Amino acid sequence: MSRSSELERLVDRYVGIPLLFLLGAARRRRRMPTAPKRIGVIQPTAIGDMFLITGLLLHLRSCWPDAEFHLFHGPTNAAAVALMPVSVVPHCCVFKRPWQVLGELRSAKLDLLINCAPWTRLTAIVTTLSGARATLGFRSPGQHIHYGYDKAVYYSPNRHEVENHRALAQCCGPLDRYRLAVSVENSPHLINLPLNKTVLFHMFAGGSRARQKSWPAASWAALANRLAKAGWVVGFTGSSTDVSAVQHVIAEAQLPMAHGICLAGRLSLPQLAYVLQRVPLLVTIDTGIAHLAAAVNGAVIGLHGPTRFERWGACNERATGLNATHPGAGYINYGFERYSRGDEIMASLSVDEVYFAVLARLRQAAIPASIHNS
């Protein structure tokens, strides 16, 4: 279910909630299986959301190492499947076609199905009707998606999203350590880049609130100019559709060719993971690349406005965040919320504030020698 379509959200709410209530009333709750052989996980959208569930996948494998894992995802996060830290059977589903999703779920003959989506009723409906022996998902405030689950975990808007997934994981077995991780491609990347002298910038978000999450291009240019004068190389990541925007910022920053490098469209996700693990720092807005960097234990500074770093930021010991001070900052919780002055929020983060935070982190940067020498 897309976050960007108002009609879809209305149908999801006003049809989905009554239907889920009726489905829940018509069935009895079942116990969680003690030794499931086939486990399914639903993560319908967003590359970043896929990286956020890697800790859950690792825990499931530690609880049931002999189980077969099925991952039900959408076209928008399919590129992240290759980076999952456990072996999975991928099922690429178009969640706008619930009959197709339901067919995929039922044909998998699952012992346990875990729905990681915190708000969509349509995803909850197909979970309830999946034919799995037991189902697990969130009980989210105001979303009413839990009626058909056999076990529901409270979804808190006051803790990091990783902690919400950790709560799901705790239902499956004792939890000693919980961490994000991805399977990183070990072969050298294909870009001639001085890794130990490069600061990566990621300026682009996806989804319905991409514009509100974006820091002004002029601010990126000013920051890049100051870092280049301090001797750093600035590498700009993104997709092939972002090339012209990157080139515009490089030109506005007046960066010499050796100090401004456009990497947009030139790195696969595994190659980007390799680079993120080895550069001194990534500066990024709230996007999936921040969570990829966290999963490879990269150093990250996240720039947050509509979201808060404490709720949605990169989650590892080398990650820090800067939150905008605008009065409307932090209005996003699930991802579909609206705010009439949302375009003003990120502009309230000053270049000086970001620059001095970046310099402080670069002074602390310590990439293990084993990484540099690999």
Image (spheres, rainbow, N blue to C red):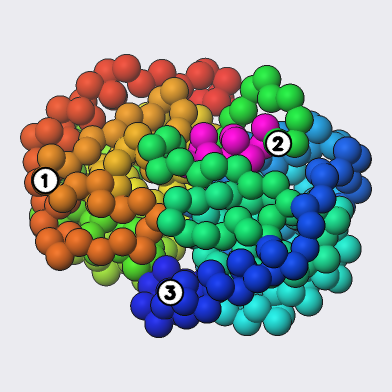
Q: Residue at x 91, y 48 (%)?
A: 37
What's under tag 3, amino acid-wise?
Arg
Q: Residue at x 74, y 67 (%)?
A: 26
Q: How many residues crowd around disc 1 within 10 Å: few (fewer than 14), some, or many (20 or more)? A: some
* Position of the C terminus by quadrant: top right
Magenta span: 161-170
Q: Residue at x 56, y 73 (%)?
A: 18
Element class at badge 1: loop
Residue 78 horizontal/vertical position (percent): 61, 63
Element class at badge 3: helix
Q: Predominant secondary structure in magenta?
A: helix
Q: Determine which residue is flagged by label 3.
A: 9
Residue 217, image quadrant: bottom left
Residue ranking furthest to the front: 25
Depicted 208 relative to depicted 111: above or below = below
Cα–Cα span, label 3 and label 2: 29 Å
Element class at badge 2: loop
Instruction: Examine the structure image and report whether residue 133 is included in the region drawn in magenta.
Output: no
Residue 313 horizontal/vertical position (percent): 38, 39
Q: Nearer the viewer, residue 4 or 140?
A: 140
Q: Determine which residue is flagged by label 1.
A: 326
Mark closest to the chain's N terminus, 1 or 2: 2
Q: From the viewer's perspective, is 178 left or right of 196? A: right
Residue 362 horizontal/vertical position (percent): 28, 24
Q: Is residue 253 visible?
A: no
Depth-wise, is mark 1 or mark 2 nearer the camera? 2
Q: Determine which residue is flagged by label 2.
A: 171
